[in-house]
């Protein structure tokens, strides 16, 4: 493929799996994540597993406008063209909204939405003729989620935004949003899936499965990809059940659950 695939959140659980499957297809990869050490280690692992893979990377805190500008300047300076953007970076903080401070809510909103839109706009400027955008949303955007409200809202925002952009770019680019249910990537997520019992087990899919479905859906230029039958069924239910019932159900089951794996700089 001409150009590079720009992968954000490359150092995360799903991000690395995207890199592996893209490398296996022969894509050239431009990786970004927060930590230079983790990016260098990932690049090394990819080179060891896929001898022919070409990778480049640049660390960036995507919630920071200046760091995003530095990332874009680095790509410009290297003359890299972008054939595909795979936006995986995301912050899944799950708290009652009164437990957020200003810094935490800006961080989550900026990584999940602002930076996705900003990076997509930049990628469009550097695009090759054959171009696509694949964004990782979430099943948590299928309905408003009390106690996970900001995450759910940022994920529906990217779903709406990229669904609209897809129409603007019709005929010139493929645009797809993948909406995974649970994916056992981090220890706290694995624990959370277990705590949900049967529902958690039915919704959860291995990262390799999710990424395979996402890439296949993006290739076919699907608007939305929902990996797994149970998640498809749940999505359908959210379209026919009144929203007030859905929020009451979620509030009942989610009020005691908390997830806060990210801080401003490290975790
Ligand atoms: N796992 C699930 O159950 C699940 C379900 C549905 C949707 N998703 C979505 O899938 C995506 C990946 O999740 P994951 O499970 O792979 O989680 P993860 O391992 O925590 O990966 C998150 C990635 O986002 C990056 N990131 C976070 N804040 C950033 C910032 N300020 N600037 C740049 N990069 C930043 C992280 O960088 P570092 O490596 O430096 O921390 C990491 O690479 C997220 O968008 C998440 O919302 C996950």
Image (tube, grey):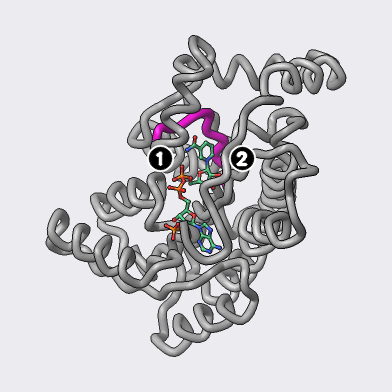
Few, some or many C-alpha atoms within 10 Å of disc 2 (few <14, some 14-19, many ≥20)? Answer: some
- The dominant secondary structure in magenta is loop
Q: Magenta part of the protein: which range?
A: 176-184
Task: Indicate whether 261 appears above or below 258.
Answer: below
Residue 171, image x, y percentages: 61, 55
Residue 68, image x, y percentages: 57, 76
Task: Indicate whether 109 appears above or below 224.
Answer: below
* Image mark count: 2
Q: Residue at x 40, y 51 (%)?
A: 12
Residue 169's tag is: none
Which is more toward the observer, 248 or 124? 248
Quadrant occupied by the N terminus: bottom left
Badge 2 is on which residue?
223
Which is more toward the observer, 101 or 211? 101
Residue 186's tag is: 1
Q: Is residue 68 left or right of residue 152?
A: left
Q: Where, by quadrant of the figure, is residue 150 drawn?
A: top right
| Camera-side mark, 1 or 2 | 1
């Amino acid at each position: 493929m001409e150009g590079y695939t720009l992968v954000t959140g490359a150092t995360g659980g799903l991000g690395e799996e995207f890199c592996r499957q893209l490398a296996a297809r022969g894509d050239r990869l431009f990786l970004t994540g927060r930590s230079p050490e983790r990016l260098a280690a990932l690049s090394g692992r990819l080179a060891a597993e896929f001898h022919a893979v070409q990778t480049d990377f640049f660390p960036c805190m995507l919630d920071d406008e200046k760091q995003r500008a530095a990332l874009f300047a680095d790509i410009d300076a290297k003359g890299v063209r972008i054939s595909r953007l795979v936006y995986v970076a995301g912050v899944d903080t799950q708290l009652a909204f009164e437990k957020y401070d200003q810094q935490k809510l800006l961080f989550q909103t900026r990584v999940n939405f602002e930076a996705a839109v900003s990076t997509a706009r930049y990628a469009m400027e550097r695009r090759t003729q054959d171009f696509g955008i694949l964004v990782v949303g979430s099943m948590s955007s299928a309905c408003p989620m009390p106690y996970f409200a900001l995450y759910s809202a940022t994920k529906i925002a990217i779903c709406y935004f990229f669904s609209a952009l897809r129409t603007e770019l019709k005929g010139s680019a493929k645009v797809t949003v993948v909406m995974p249910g649970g994916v056992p990537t981090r220890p706290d997520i694995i624990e959370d899936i277990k705590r949900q019992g049967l529902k958690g087990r039915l919704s959860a899919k291995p990262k390799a499965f999710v990424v395979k479905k996402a890439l296949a859906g993006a290739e076919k230029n699907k608007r939305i990809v929902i990996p797994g039958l149970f998640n498809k069924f749940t999505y359908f239910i959210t379209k026919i059940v009144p929203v007030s019932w859905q929020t009451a159900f979620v509030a009942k089951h989610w009020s005691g659950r908390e997830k806060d794996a990210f801080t401003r700089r490290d975790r």
